Image: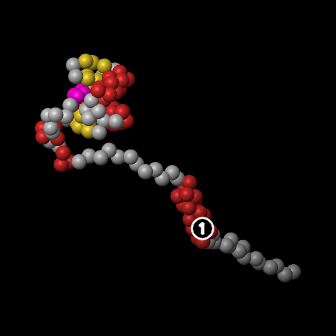
Amino acid sequence: MRLEWRVPRRPNPIGLTPLIDVVFILLLFFLLASHFEARRALPIDATQTALAETADSDVPSLSIRLHADGHIDLGDVRLEQGAVVERLRDRLRQQPELRVLIHPDAEVELQALVSLMDRILALGVTEVTLE
């Protein structure tokens, strides 16, 4: 009786080529499926830091103080954020070249400040200054 001794064959090693192909296809998928958004930035000119001091006195200006609790002082009047837009719109009808000076408190969140600036710029104010 003759016995054949079979040595178990080792399975074929996994090749790296299919793995690299799969990773490349996933990379392409995520690159093509991702949303490339142009970030909107606020233009800030560091050379105009002393704008309020050197500005013409003929240009009317309006002072706005932004508090950390969300209230806004328009001149001497304390208002909610929605009312500020209406008052500012009325002032812009009377004085189209109005300059707005914003005085944020130290504790004001950046998002609240940027939101206020966006609303002011959306009304058509051409000059907004942070002090």
State whether residue 109 appears in this view.
no
* Image-quadrant location for residue 22: bottom right
Could you tell whether 14 is left or right of 112 in the image? Answer: right
Looking at the image, which residue sits at the far bottom? 2
Report if residue 60 lies within the magenta region: no
Magenta residues span 61-65
SS state under label 1: helix
Q: Nearer the viewer, residue 105 or 76?
A: 76
Q: Residue at x 58, y 58 (%)?
A: 29
Location of the C terminus by quadrant is: top left
Could you tell whether 24 is left or right of 64 in the image? Answer: right
* Image-quadrant location for residue 85: top left
Give the percent coordinates (x, y) of residue 123. 36, 33
The image shows residue 20, relative to residue 130, as above or below, that is: below
Give the percent coordinates (x, y) of residue 70. 32, 24
Indicate the colouring scheme.
secondary structure
Amino acid at circle 1: Asp
The image shows residue 117, relative to residue 89, as above or below, that is: below
User: Which secondary structure dominates the residues rendered in magenta?
Assistant: strand
Q: Residue at x 25, y 32 (%)?
A: 98
- Where does label 1 land, which residue? 21
Location of the N terminus by quadrant is: bottom right
